[in-house]
Image (cartoon, grey):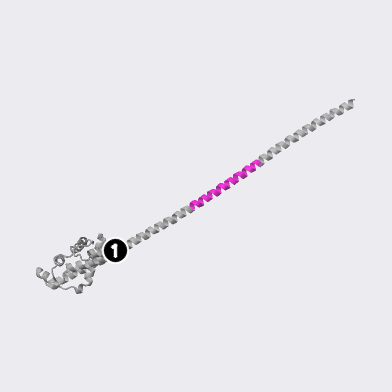
Amino acid sequence: RDSFEAENILQDVFISVWETRHKINEYMVIGSLLYRIARNKALNALRKEVNKKTYLEYLSFISSNADSSTELKIDFEELEFFIRKFIMKLPDRRREIFLYSFDKGLSYKEIALKLSISENTVDTQIRNALESAEKAKKFLTEAEEKKRKTLEEAERKRAEIIETAKKDALTVAGQIQQDAEKTAEKLVSDAKNEIKATLEKTKSELKIETGKLAIEIAEKILREKMTYNANKEIVERIIKGM
């Protein structure tokens, strides 16, 4: 198992011990009690993962390990590491008493005789150790909840940023489209104006050319008329002279 799962199991172990502390007496060996609870918690954790294994694999695993008192597929060495890590944070006297029970399996009476203290003191120190575990569990739970909320807030902000970016992208795309449409409209308008101007110019030039042609024709007619009149006058003179 990974360290996170092992630490979760450890926390559950101490909480279970704390919740049943009224059943603990001087004849119980705390180390054995912790191990038994830890073993059950570990098996429960395995059962929750049955969907990740086939049913036959699960039965095979449990049957081959259920009677083992020293080793499971769960890494109990790692679990014990976390237990000792917690124990090392206890006050010296409390840690000493707890280790005599957890490591050496001494009863309350044996520990009291060895340290020249009362059994009641042993009981109090062990209960205080378990109470410290409860406080540690609460602290870790609160820290985990804070971490969860922080991650949720980060995810929410990430989603907001993505949504804002999408909206900004759509806005920019819309603006680009509007600009393109305006540019196209201006180009069309400019083209129409240019065509209109060209047509007006053509009409004007055509009028000028037509006027010139009319003048030329009129001048030609006038010249021909003058020639005709001159010729007529000559003919009339000739006739009179005869």
Taking depth in this image into account, of 201 and 241 the one nearest to the observer is: 201
Q: Residue 158 is drawn in which quadrant?
A: bottom left
Q: Residues within 10 Å of mark 1 (few under 14, many from 20)?
A: few
Give the side of residue 61 with respect to residue 166, left or right: left
Q: Is residue 12 above or below residue 182?
A: below
| Residue 239: image location, x then y, percent | 88, 27
Which residue bears the numbered disc 1?
A: 56
Rendered-image quadrant of the N terminus:
bottom left
Q: Residue furthest bottom?
A: 22
| Residue 131: image location, x then y, percent | 21, 69
Q: Is residue 206 visible?
A: yes
| Residue 75: image location, x then y, percent | 22, 61
- Chain part drawn in magenta: 175-202
Rendered-image quadrant of the C terminus:
top right
| Main secondary structure found in the magenta portion | helix
Residue 152 counted in the magenta span: no
| Residue 34: image location, x then y, percent | 19, 67
Taking depth in this image into account, of 63 and 237 the one nearest to the observer is: 63
Give the side of residue 58 with respect to residue 29, left or right: right
Q: Give the residue at x 67% y 40%.
A: 206
Q: Secondary structure at mark 1?
A: helix
Residue 201 counted in the magenta span: yes
